[in-house]
Image (cartoon, helix red, strand yellow):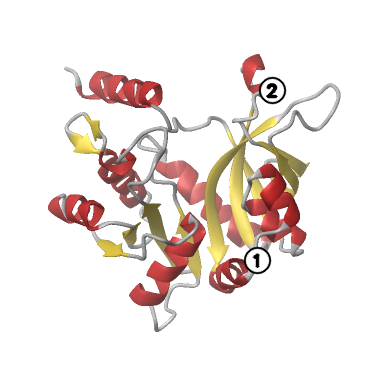
Amino acid sequence: MNPILLIPARLASTRLPAKPLADIGGVPMIVRVLRQAEAAGLGPVVVAAGEAEIVAAVEAAGGRAVLTDPGLPSGSDRIHAALERLDPERRHDVVVNLQGDLPALDPAQIRTVVTALADSGADIATLAAQITDPAERDNPSVVKAVVAWNGRLGRALYFTRATAPFGDGPLFHHVGIYAYRRDALARFVALPPSPLEMREKLEQLRALEADMSIAVARVDSVPLSVDTPADLAKAQQFFARKISP
């Protein structure tokens, strides 16, 4: 397998404007994510940017970025467009899609999602962690992965914002990073939005409705996601503690 790691990023965000450029310990958030991806040591890392300002911030930090159409509807479409520009020779057969709002993402989790793709033979792989905070069980902002587990690797049956599955037992918080086989990514972005995808507002349901397989690897923690000013403050505090003497 020959992975390439792509990080889609755009400035439009209703809850946290210009989110990729948010300052975290003197470093733009998108650069924080870039550094974590590079630390995984899996392959080249490129930011698929919707605006020139993001490209400039990444290149100023010594990273690599490509400018994509700001009107693309999703991160998946953005990384596919970037991939076609970056690798027309199709040297990379695995594409890792990393969210640009995970500044403290553990590089080991990136390696885990690629291993899950290789070990499962699935079209797509992703991650999930057991929910330990009772408040998350009924929170629609926390996406639950319903998985047929076989140890720490399983097969996704469904993803939902509801509390599922019903009854006693663990629930799993979906960690939204993905590894795609290249042909699976091309197939996925060519599909129209599916009924369940539109109902739940969860893009990965498009793949399941099209009979694509998604492997899920279990991890021990959910990385901090920066979606609001309060989340940004938490990330700033995290890195302040990390770099303090």
Q: CA distance from mark 1 to mark 2?
A: 30 Å
| Residue at horizontal 63 percent and vertical 22 percent from the top | 136
Outermost left residue: 60
Taking depth in this image into account, of 30 and 131 the one nearest to the observer is 30
Residue 200 rendering spot, x and y as whole percentages:
69, 43
Q: Answer yes or no: do the residues labelled 1 and 2 have beta carbons within 8 Å?
A: no
Residue 180 rendering spot, x and y as whole percentages:
56, 62
Residue 143 vs 31, above or below: the answer is above
Q: Which mark is residue 200?
A: none
Labels 1, 2: front one: 1
Q: Which residue is mark 1?
A: 192
Q: Amino acid at mark 2?
A: Arg
Secondary structure of the residue carrying numbered label 2: helix
Q: Amino acid at mark 1?
A: Pro
Q: Dividing the picture into quarters, in which one does residue 6 lie?
A: bottom left
Outermost right residue: 167
Residue 105 rendering spot, x and y as whole percentages:
41, 38
Q: Residues within 10 Å of mark 2 (few under 14, many from 20)?
A: many
| Residue at horizontal 43 percent and vertical 32 percent from the top | 227
Q: Which mark is residue 137?
A: 2
| Residue at horizontal 65 percent and vertical 29 percent from the top | 140
Quick check: 58 left or right of 95?
Answer: left
Residue 221 vs 115, above or below: the answer is above
Quick check: 244 left or right of 199?
Answer: left
Q: Dividing the picture into quarters, in which one does residue 176 lie?
A: top right
Secondary structure of the residue carrying numbered label 1: loop
